[in-house]
């Protein structure tokens, strides 16, 4: 084949074959062609991706518009309650027989013989906050959980005694003495009747309503027992505890010097952490007292949220303390002391609720039995002082 024939055959080939870089053996041209091909493919992919993203955003916007229309009933619930709280609320409304399996598993069964279910932790925390409002003793006493119905507390009843002596004088033997004291846990219980209609149709927070009802009654009964309980079926109260030192007023009426005497009669280690306790009527009498310089003993708080003070120590209003006595009467209206050291509260069962849909069903009611087990009392009498106002003196 001569040169003329070869030129004719090459001229007859397609253009892309005639310009194939591989035949020219030019690697730079081949690399440039590959880069241009990738750039073109990348631009095409990016364009297609932007179009798909724009279409998806348009669909989401249209869907949100439909969901936000009034009456659709499909608005997002941004405050979905925890499983435990939802389970307890459904237990109160419908009973365990009509609950879902995961909700039944979320309920905590009471281990006591009375049965029922324990309220969830969030519910109990709310109940405890309400109890502090109704039972102020909890806000100043030492509160701990209990694992038994009877708490034994070791107590030192005697201290060691050292004596001075010369270098060769014999030392005297001594040893401390220990004893124990017992605090019993008692049961506090009540029930609430709720109509079937209210349980089925109520739109309010049924859990919060039950929490308020139980807290109000439990707090009232508990606070009264911690102050005036006689120890029979209930805690032994502060005013019925033997061994607390009591000071008498110097006259028939309360004076500023009487409070000063009480303050300085308490040992300094306790006085530094002590609080005053009295009810509202006695507070009204104390606020009128002045020292010899004409200054009121009662000092209101300088900042919001802080309690008022008497002689620099906080005042707690205890509604179950006695009133200021009338003429020809006497009472123990004021207590002063370190409650954290002196008064202990033991919580055994915070709150157990038993739903009874049968006994009152003839009246269209469901009965909720609530119970809690708590014990408490004075465990260190030396950390408290009582002031007696005796107006029987002629």
Image (cartoon, rainbow, N blue to C red):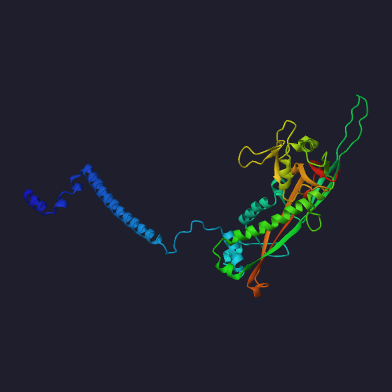
**Residue farthest to the top, as pictured:** 167
The correct choice, above or below, for 293 with respect to 242 in the image is: above
The correct choice, above or below, for 267 with respect to 105 in the image is: above
Image-quadrant location for residue 336: top right
**Residue farthest to the bottom, as pictured:** 362
Residue 235 lies, in percent from the top left, at 78, 54
- Residue placed at 39% from the left, 58% from the top? 64
Image-quadrant location for residue 293: top right
- Residue placed at 62% from the left, 56% from the top? 123
Residue 190 lies, in percent from the top left, at 70, 62
| Figure quadrant of the C terminus | top right
**Front residue (pair 134, 368):** 134
- Residue placed at 72% from the left, 65% from the top? 114
Tell me if residue 158 can be seen.
yes
Image-quadrant location for residue 249: top right
**Residue farthest to the left, as pictured:** 4
The correct choice, above or below, for 207 with respect to 250 in the image is: below
Residue 275 lies, in percent from the top left, at 72, 41
Describe residue 9's horizontal placement relative to residue 323 as left or right: left
The correct choice, above or below, for 309 with respect to 364 in the image is: above
Tell me if residue 1 can be seen.
no
Residue 46 lies, in percent from the top left, at 29, 51
């Amino acid at each position: 084949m001569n040169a003329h024939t070869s030129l004719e055959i090459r001229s007859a080939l397609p253009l892309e074959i005639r310009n194939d870089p591989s035949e020219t053996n030019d690697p730079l041209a081949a690399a440039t062609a590959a880069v241009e091909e990738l750039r073109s493919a990348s631009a095409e992919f990016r364009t297609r991706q932007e179009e798909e993203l724009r279409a998806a955003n348009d669909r989401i916007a249209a869907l949100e518009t439909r969901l936000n229309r009034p009456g659709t009933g499909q608005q997002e619930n941004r405050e979905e309650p925890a499983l435990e709280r939802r389970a307890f609320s459904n237990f109160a409304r419908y009973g365990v027989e009509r609950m879902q399996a995961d909700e039944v598993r979320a309920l905590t069964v009471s281990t006591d013989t009375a049965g029922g279910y324990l309220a969830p932790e969030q519910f109990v925390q709310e109940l405890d906050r309400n109890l502090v409002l109704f039972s102020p003793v909890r806000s100043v006493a030492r509160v701990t959980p209990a694992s038994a119905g009877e708490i034994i507390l070791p107590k030192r009843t005697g201290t060691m005694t050292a004596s001075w002596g010369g270098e060769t004088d014999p030392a005297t033997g001594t040893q401390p003495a220990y004893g124990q004291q017992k605090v019993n846990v008692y049961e506090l219980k009540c029930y609430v009747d709720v109509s079937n209609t209210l349980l089925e149709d109520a739109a309010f927070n049924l859990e919060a309503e039950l929490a308020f009802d139980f807290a109000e009654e439990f707090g009232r009964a508990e606070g009264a027992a911690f102050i005036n309980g006689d120890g029979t079926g209930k805690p032994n109260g502060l005013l019925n505890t033997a061994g607390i030192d009591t000071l008498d007023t110097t006259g028939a009426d309360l004076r500023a010097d009487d409070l000063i005497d009480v303050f300085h009669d308490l040992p300094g280690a306790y006085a530094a952490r002590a609080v005053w306790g009295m009810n509202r009527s006695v507070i009204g009498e104390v606020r009128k007292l002045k020292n010899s310089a004409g200054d009121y003993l009662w000092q209101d708080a300088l900042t919001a949220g802080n309690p008022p003070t008497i002689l620099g120590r906080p005042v707690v209003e205890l509604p179950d303390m006695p009133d200021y006595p009338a003429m020809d009467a006497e009472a123990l209206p004021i207590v002063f002391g370190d409650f954290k050291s002196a008064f202990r509260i033991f919580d055994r069962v915070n709150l157990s609720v038993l739903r009874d849909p049968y006994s009152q069903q003839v009246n269209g009611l469901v009965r909720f039995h609530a119970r809690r087990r708590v014990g408490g009392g004075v465990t260190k009498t030396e950390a408290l002082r009582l002031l007696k106002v005796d107006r029987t003196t002629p």
